[in-house]
Amino acid sequence: MSVRNLTRKFLPALSKLSAENKLFINAMPEMRLAQMLRNGDKNIVQVGMNQCKAARILPGKIHTIYTDGLAGCNSVGVVAKGLDGNPVAILSHYTPLQTSRQLQMSVIDKQLQTYDYYLDKTFSPKIFYNIPGYPDEKQVLQPCVNPLVESIKSVFNKWFKSGYDEHIALYQCRNRPAFFSSANIFQFDPKNVNNLKITTVGEKEHFINLAKNV
């Protein structure tokens, strides 16, 4: 894949030198993307807190959409296919408050309504939840009580009557190490937009071939 590598092999330790800490912060994946945006890169879409954005992914155009850092928030992403074979990506980032959950459902619903005419109904859309978890006694992350996951299915069932694939990624909210990345990043290969790399909180990488409708 010709996708920019944003992840680090290891997290740096907190330094006594503020200049070094600044360098470590700027090396975080979301910070690197933010710098590219400031430098005028028009192929990247940033999704801030309490925002939902959609993008048609086309060769040579928009190829990356990402959230700011998550800290107790819910991120829901949707990847569908357009009738021209190119992906449509919808990414949201909202607080867990009840009013925010309702708003998150509403804006995703509106985005799906906007793109419904354009979507290929033979493709099974991919739904990605990035939600907070807590470590159990064995330090294995378990999902927090999260009404959003079940509630928002009413939106997806409305637009995706033939079904969809769901993927849940849990992330640690508390006691995270210094310079821990908490962004949710969707990167499509500019040369083959069917190749998708998702980097979830903690810089965990997932590779998906959208040409395979499974």
Image: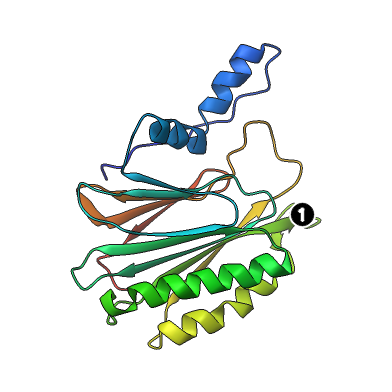
At mark 1, the secondary structure is: loop
* Relative side of 14 to 29, left or right: right
Quadrant that contains the C terminus? bottom left
Place of residue 154 in the rendered image (x, y in percent of width and height, measured from the top left): 55, 84
Q: Mark 1 is on which residue type?
A: Lys
Q: 168 above or below 17?
A: below
Place of residue 211 in the rendered image (x, y in percent of width and height, measured from the top left): 24, 66
Q: Nearer the viewer, residue 86 or 116?
A: 116
Residue 120 visible: no
Q: Give the quadrant of residue 75.
A: bottom right
Q: Image point 20% across, 67% down: which residue?
A: 85
Q: Give the quadrant of residue 114.
A: bottom left
Q: 129 above or below 60?
A: below
Q: Give the quadrant of residue 119.
A: bottom left
Q: Image point 62% across, 19% down: which residue?
A: 21
Q: Nearer the viewer, residue 78 or 213?
A: 78
Q: Nearer the viewer, residue 131 or 58?
A: 58
Q: Image point 51% across, 80% down: which residue?
A: 155
